[in-house]
Image: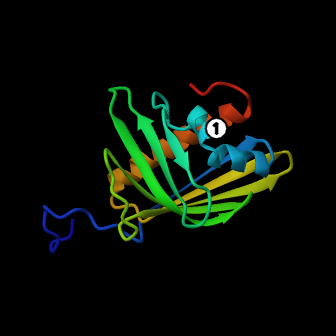
């Protein structure tokens, strides 16, 4: 917190805090892109360990919105919502990102996620860049979440049930 920031103010998203994670998974870019963007497939792999996705809605088009439920072990749900800003199938997605127990869509306050799907022979390298993260604790939480999601996707692409 800076000396001029009021302790009761919500953190202002920082353009300087970001996160980059990568994973090589089995499957061509088209197949991996579909796993990332089809609600029925997302629900099978989304979430870090012990978090499941009981509901997901995806309107895959520029301007379309998505909504992903994260069911936590204590029974609470954290929603992730946003809007697609770029859709270049099967190579790139860019979307806004907000999360909370009942987030209200606010394009000005949203974080940004860019996902690249890079063909590597019979595999695809996924590169996730998450920008405008408000604070270091959120960055740590997102890192844990993204790595867990990529673990689940990796298992899903290998035909295994994510743990």
Instruction: Decide if residue 129 is on the left or right side of residue 120.
Output: left
Location of the N terminus (image quadrant) = bottom left
User: Where residue 107 appears, x then y in whole percent?
Assistant: 40, 68
Q: Residue at point 80% right, 54% down? A: 119
Q: Residue at point 43% right, 38% down? A: 70
| Front residue of 104 and 110 | 104
Q: Residue at point 34% right, 61% down? A: 134
Q: How is the image coloured?
A: rainbow
> Which residue in the protein does label 1 denote?
41
| Front residue of 127 and 77 | 77
Q: Is residue 80 above or below residue 129?
A: above
Instruction: Decide if residue 39 is on the left or right side of residue 79.
Output: right
Location of the C terminus (image quadrant) = top right
Q: Is residue 73 above or below residue 138?
A: above
Q: Residue at point 40% right, 64% down? A: 110
Q: Which residue of the protein is positioned furthest toward the right in this rendering?
A: 121
| Front residue of 9 and 96 | 96
User: Where residue 15 appears, x then y in whole percent?
Assistant: 41, 71
- Asked which quadrant contains residue 115, the reply is bottom right
**Dot 1 alpha-carbon crowd within 10 angstroms: few under 14, some 14 to 19, many 20 or more:** some
User: Where residue 51 appears, x then y in whole percent?
Assistant: 45, 31
Q: Which residue of the protein is positioned furthest toward the bottom in this rendering?
A: 4
């Amino acid at each position: 917190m800076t000396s001029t920031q009021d302790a009761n103010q919500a953190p202002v998203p920082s353009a300087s805090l970001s996160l980059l994670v990568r994973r090589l998974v089995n499957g061509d870019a088209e197949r991996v892109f579909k796993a990332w963007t089809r609600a029925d497939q997302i629900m099978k792999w989304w979430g870090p360990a012990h978090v499941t996705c009981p509901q997901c809605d995806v309107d895959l088009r520029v301007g379309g919105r998505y909504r992903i439920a994260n069911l936590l072990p204590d029974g609470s749900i954290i929603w992730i919502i946003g809007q697609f800003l770029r859709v270049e199938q099967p190579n790139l997605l860019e979307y806004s990102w907000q999360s909370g127990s009942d987030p209200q869509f606010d394009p000005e306050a949203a974080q940004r996620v860019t996902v690249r799907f890079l063909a590597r022979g019979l595999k695809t390298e996924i590169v996730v860049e998450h920008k405008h993260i408000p604070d270091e604790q959120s960055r740590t939480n997102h890192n844990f979440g993204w790595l867990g999601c990529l673990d689940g996707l990796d298992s899903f692409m290998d035909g295994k049930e994510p743990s």
